[in-house]
Amino acid sequence: MLNVQVAPVKIAELDFARGRVGQLLGEQEVPGFAVALGQNTHFVTKSNTAFCGDGRLTVRFAQTPEGHIDDTTAASEIVVPQLFGGVGLSATKACVAANATIIHGATSFTEAYRIVSASLFELPEKIEDAGHEDCGASGNVLSSVENEIPGESLIQGIGLFIPTTEEVIQIAGRNAVIKQRRLQAGFYADWSPADHADYLTSRYPQNFTYLKGDDNDHVAHGHHESGVYVITGDQQGFAKNQFIQNTDGKEAFAVTAWMMQFLARKLGASEEERTAILVGFIDDTLHVGAGLVKPGMPVFAHQQ
């Protein structure tokens, strides 16, 4: 792994969150946590996928990735982009919200997902889908649409990723209307997390992971994240397992902003549609995160 010199800082707190996951930091702990995030930021070793942004330790794969001796080695050495739910699910939610051309004709969310997942692999970059067992983003597809973030808070959240121009504000509003219309039409109702996992293990077992949970923890299921890390630098990623090992067990959610931009460019049929897909990625990241984490969860990013 090639380390990069970044200095993340705390840029916001998710005050609109409503979840139960997280071990919130004391103010005196924030600088050290930010330094550790930067120390475990590297150039990605695999750029044609995006794993989930879940911060828990990766313990094994459905199939050990090629070129690695065992799962432990792979989990420590692989650095990939991260998007909540994995690349296929997050891209589908973004395309659905944007009413993108690629999913026109799909009559359900599952159908849209299969179209997007297959289309990603048909790109010249051959983007491989990914996910993990017991994924909160997959399990909460419906609730992440049902529970809307208030408009002003949503725009502030989007502003953590991109400038909130008048165009972006209008697109965010239009995407929100599209999501609610699809929700009321039952578009999302057929989604099955179990079918999602079966699909991934049969097609992309090298990208399907099993994370360290806690069956006795009925509230957080073993989550101990203390922040959300937004990775902005091109081709940079977060070495999650390394971070956990180097900080005596601290964890962080991570999302890769540059991968959202890359995918929006690839999947959009026009410039306006590309912007709508990008906003869809950011919007979904905020909605999934809001359903998982405790109010006040800090957000970190490297300000370029």
Image (cartoon, helix red, strand yellow):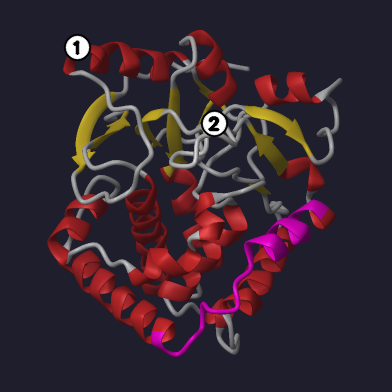
Q: Which is more toward the observer, 21 or 50?
A: 21
Asked whether residue 270 is in view, the answer is: no
Residue 97 vs residue 109, the one in the foreground: 109
Hey, what amino acid is under mark 2? Arg
Q: Which mark is residue 56?
A: 2
Give the percent coordinates (x, y) of residue 154: 22, 59
Helix, strand or loop for disc 2 = loop
Identify residue type, mark 1. Answer: Gln
- Magenta-highlighted residues: 184-201
Q: Is residue 167 above or below residue 294?
A: below
Residue 48, compared with residue 243, is above or below; it is below
Magenta stretch encompasses residue 244: no
Q: Which residue does the numbered mark 1 point to in the structure image?
A: 28
For the residues marked 1 and 2, what is the alpha-carbon distance in whole angstroms?
23 Å
Q: Residue at x 41, y 74 (%)?
A: 98
Where does residue 33 sit, x and y in percent of width and height? 33, 16
